[in-house]
Structure formats: C-alpha cells, structure tokens
Image (cartoon, rainbow, N blue to C red):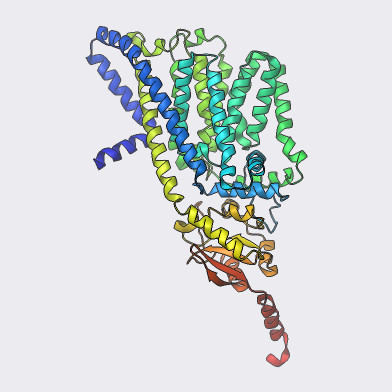
Amino acid sequence: MRMLVDFIILCSQHPLYTTAVLLVLWMVSCRVIPKTFTGDLNERFWKRIRPLLVLVSVGVFLSFLANCLWYLNHAGYTSDVEPMVAAVSWWVRSGGELYHAPDAAQQYSVLYGPGVYLATAFYLDLLGPTVLASKLGALLALYGSLAMLFLTLRRWVSNSLAFGMTTIAVLLYWNCGNAAMLVRPDAYLLAAVCLGLYSAGSPRRVLAVLGAALGLGLAVNQKLHAVLYLLPILTVLDRQHGWRATLTALGLGGVVILLPFVLHDGISLTHYMNWLFITAHHGLRFEDLPHLMSRALFYAIPALVPMFAHQASANRAGVRPQFILSWAVGNLLVVFLAMKPGAGQVHLLPLIPVNLVFAARLWPAEGIRGFLIPEAKASWRHGLVGAFIVTAMLSGVVSGYRSARMASSLMQDAPGITEDIRRILTVYADRDIAMGCGGDNQFFHWTSQRSLLTFAGEPLLIDIISLMDSRRAHKPIPSATYDVFDTGMIDLWLIPKGQEPFAIANWYAPHDPVFPDDFREHFVAHYSREGQTEYFDLWGWDPTAGLDAIRIEAGRADPSHR
C-alpha cells in the first residue's frame, strides 16, 4: 500500500511526464481496439460521462472552497512571508514607511510592489487588525479571479465547457500547493490578470481600454515583472480595438502604477527602485530550469492542443501569429525569471488563466466534440486531452491534500503562540517589544505570529525574511541597526525558547549566517535573558551596558591603570 501511495505522489509531482505516459498508453490502445468500436464508444461515453464530470467539477470547487475557509479561520499562517506582509501592511496603515532607505535602522522591506500591502491594509482597517482580516482580501481576490475567468471563457465556448475549464484552473492552482490563497501578491495578481483578460476581449472599446489598463496597473503593482503576463492581453486589445486603444491602455496603466507612489506619503519610488537594484544581485538558479520548463509545458497543454489541431486557426480568425508570439515570449520570459532564488513555480500561476483563455480562443467552432470525438488520424488529440484532465485531477488533488496537511502541521502551535504573545503584551504593556529569531529552522515557525506585535502598536524594526533577501545580495546590515541596541529602542525581544538569538542561517545558498558574529555579540552585550514563557525567551535591554563600555574605555585611557 505504501508503494502505491508513493507512486501516486511521484506521478503528481511530475505531471508532464505522467501525461506523456498516459498519452502513449492511449495511442497503444487505439491500435489494439478496433476503430469502429472506439468511435461508437467515444460517442456514447461522452454523453454518459458528462453529468459525472459536472458532479466532479462541483466537488472540486466545494473541496477547494472548504480548504480556503478552513485556512481563513485558522489562527496561523502557513508561509513565512505572510506575517511579514501583514505586519508591514498595518505598519504602513499606521503611518510607517513601506520601503525604507537601504541604510536605515529598520530592515523589513522586500521586493513586492505596493499593491499587496495596500489591499491587505484595507481589510485590516475595515475589520480590525487580525490574522483573519489579513487573509480575507487574498481569498476574495482568488475567487474574483475565478469568476472573471469563467465569464471570459463563456465568450468563446459553451457554459458547461467554460465551467469545466475553470475547474481545471482550480486544479492547476492546487498543483502549486496553497500559494494561490496565501497573504502574498499571487491571489491579487491572478485577479488583475483575469480582469485584463475579461476586459481586453470586450466589444466595447472604452470598457476594454479601461479594464486592460486597470489590470495592467494592478498587476505590475503586485510584482514588477507582471507585465509579461499581460503581453497576450495587450495583443488581444490591439486586435480588437487597434493600436490607439493599446497605447491608451499602456498610458493609463502607467498612471495606475504610479498612483500609490504619488498619493501615499509612506511609499517612496526612490527607495523601491533601490531595493529592486539590490535584489537584482540574487542571480539565477539554472538547475531549476528543467523543473520549471516541464511545469510550464504542462500548464500550456490546453493551449498547445488546439494550436496544433487541424483548421483551429481557420475557425478562430481572430487569433493571429502576433498573439501566439506574445503568448510564447511571455511564457518563456516568466520561466526565465522564475529561476531567481526564492521565486520558483509560484511565478507560473498567472500563466494558467492566460493559457486557458488562449485555448478557448483557439477552440474549433464545433466545440469539444471536435477534440474528444476526432477522426482516427487525429486521435492523439483525444488522448492528450484525456491524459491532461486525468493528470490535472491527480496532481491537483494530491498536491492540495498534502499542502493542507503540511499547513496544518506548521500551524498547529499557532493558537498557543497567539495566547502566549497576548499574555506578553499584557504583562509588559509598558515596554517596546519585537520578534527576533533563533538558530534552528525547526523553531522558526514560532515567529509566524509576529504580526500580532505590530497589530498591537509595537515598533517594527527588522523582519528576517527581508534580511535574508538583502544578505543574499551581499548587502551588510547597516550600522544604524546596530545603534538601535545602544539606545534601547526595543527593550524586549522575543526569541524562540531555548534558541541562541539571531543565529539562523540564510535559506538562500550558500546558507551563510544572516546575522554576522559582531551583530550577535552586540546584541548579547546590550540584552540579557530576563524571563521565559511557554514559547519564548524574553531578552531585555540592559541600560547599564553602554555605561559599562564607557567606563572600560575611560579606564584604558587613565594612566594610573597602566
């Protein structure tokens, strides 16, 4: 039984190769079984299985929704980036800077655009600063993207097929684990891309231009490279409404991109660009290319099948070579950027709705029967569609289940940690408190509730995720950060229980220490462990440490001590 489970997991982890094997099996079966029998079987099979496919689609949606609602109502986060996004969002809402200067004492900025922070801050402000409120916006954006995807697909295929293709999107999202529902830019980026897809195909020129511009602006305000996902969308807009409409959309999209920097006093375009240049030194992990390319090809199968089908382009005269070129270039460039350390497969998520809409535009006029009941010479299409659907179901369900189990394991201590932090905030209400880290990665998730400190009005000095990014780019920790220890701006640090303070190694290769030896020595010189709770050691500031250092220096300068 264990071998079977391991085999299923292996197949789900390599969906492209699983699809290829299933396709080969189909082609072999077509040669063994008489063609007249398979033709009749296909006709009857499709009629009978259609209600079952509808039930399966509904089941997939309900399961995905249940998973999302479970995560929404849980007290914890499953990704280490989420508490950083939540904390910085509330910090900006409270008057802090989103992007600090590279040499500032505070070190919490990362490469994300301002969109995810402003959206998260909106829900935190609307519902109050809680973990649930920080998650809500991403989930609403995710389901908004699915609704817009369905409405877009309906323009080109039947309602039932559009529903089925949207189900495929859900399964492919799940194939990336929980990434689409986390407090990160990904859900908002999916919504922006789907808004652009829906708008660009509108027959109304004004709505098409405004929607495409808004989608472009919102997408780039999540991640700068998001313009690559919009290349096919802009090509559609150009085809539907001409080059003037496209240029107008680009201009208005640029305005949307700049609005947060112009209207918000706490968002500096200069500092944002500085951080972009710093993280540009991360380099690329070329060893990830085979995995990323195979996953991108798997996601592209819905578009590749009709692209190479007989007379597909003739049936969809609105699809021109420029559209295919922009789609291919966008896919390849996204794969290239996904090799950046810390990026990975999640960069491919927005390609999923783009590929499905591209497939719908290429679909033969006679509908799905042209693929599922083809002539004998085109039986490979039937096999590839079936293999892809089976693999998408397998990989989506298995990946979704395993991701939920992993999330449950990572968040199992979250309720206890939450109560522990609340007790600390109550007992030490007169002190400025911040979250540090230890040296063992197994206990790093104990810091995942650090956003609760910022929600309670505590100062935000450093975030470990931000420092890992900057240290990967060989940027030293500013001297101003060291100076904070001297002044006691933070007079109580929470360090995971039993851990050496700030001894964690960088998750990026070559896994050097995030904090150099002199930083840790400086911390120990100014702080001492003064207490312990269920999850944390409490390191308090020693106001005499600076005076002791002065006395030592004075003693060395006194001739009587020679």
Q: Is residue 162 above or below residue 343?
A: above
Where residue 394 sits: x, y (%)? 36, 31
Q: Is residue 437 above or below residue 95?
A: below
The quarter of the rendered structure image containing the C terminus is bottom right
Where residue 11 sits: x, y (%)? 33, 34
Q: Name the residue located 45 percent from the left edge and 17 percent from the top edge.
A: 161
View extreme (bottom): residue: 560
Q: Is residue 182 visible?
A: yes
Dividing the picture into quarters, in which one does residue 425 lie?
A: bottom right
Q: Is residue 140 left or right of residue 480?
A: left
Q: Name the residue located 61 percent from the left edge and 73 percent from the top edge.
A: 525
Q: How many marks?
A: 0
Q: Is residue 502 visible?
A: no
Viewer-proximal residue among 27 and 361: 361
The quarter of the rendered structure image containing the N terminus is top left
Q: Name the residue located 35 percent from the left edge and 23 percent from the top edge.
A: 387
Where residue 356 sits: x, y (%)? 50, 22
Viewer-proximal residue among 23 and 397: 397
Dividing the picture into quarters, in which one does residue 385 lie?
A: top left
Dividing the picture into quarters, in which one does residue 234 lie?
A: top right
Q: Is residue 536 left or right of residue 97?
A: left
Q: Is residue 447 above or below residue 314?
A: below
Where residue 336 sits: x, y (%)? 53, 36
Q: Is residue 361 above or below residue 81?
A: above
